[in-house]
Image (cartoon, grey):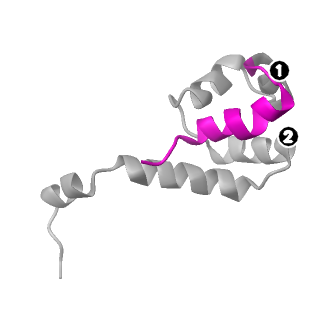
Amino acid sequence: MSEHPGQAVRQRCMQPLGLNVTQAAGLLGVSRKTLSMILNGKAGITPEMAVRLALVFNTRAENWLYRQADYDLAQISRDQIQAQIRSLT
């Protein structure tokens, strides 16, 4: 299963720099609560947050959005959706 992108923010961006949630939130220009929700998998990375992460941690916004999309798709049960719809072909 795909990991929530918040885990990558914590493990690959914050921890190597020794940043806590309050410090990272300040750098990102968001509330501690907003960042905490992302880190704990309770909220996703929006395009705006992806840009903020890219600017602060010298990454690419697109990569954060790809991670979020991969995670979101992994959470969807393909079988459950297929049981609810009928293909045209």
Residue furthest to the front in view is 16
Label 1 vs label 2: CA separation? Answer: 12 Å
Residue 38, located in which quarter of the rendered image?
top right
Question: Is 46 a magenta residue?
Answer: no
The residue drawn where x is 40% and y is 51% is: 74
Look at the magenta stretch and give its main secondary structure: helix
Q: In this view of the protein, which residue sits in the foreground, 10 or 58?
A: 10
Tell me where residue 32 appears, x and y as whole percent: 71, 18
Tell me where residue 52 appears, x and y as whole percent: 78, 41
Describe the element under mark 2 as helix, strand or loop: helix
What residue does disc 2 label? 56
The residue drawn where x is 60% and y is 36% is: 7
Q: In this view of the protein, which residue sits in the foreground, 14 or 27?
A: 14
The residue drawn where x is 55% and y is 49% is: 68
Circle 2: residue type = Val
Left or right, 64 with reference to 27? left
Residue 24, located in which quarter of the rendered image?
top right
Circle 1: residue type = Gln
For the record, the magenta segment spans 1-21
Q: Decide: marks 1, 2 in contact (CB < 8 A)?
A: no
What residue does disc 1 label? 23
The vertical placement of 46 against 62, above or below, is: above
Q: Quadrant of the C terminus?
A: bottom left
The vertical placement of 15 against 74, above or below, is: above
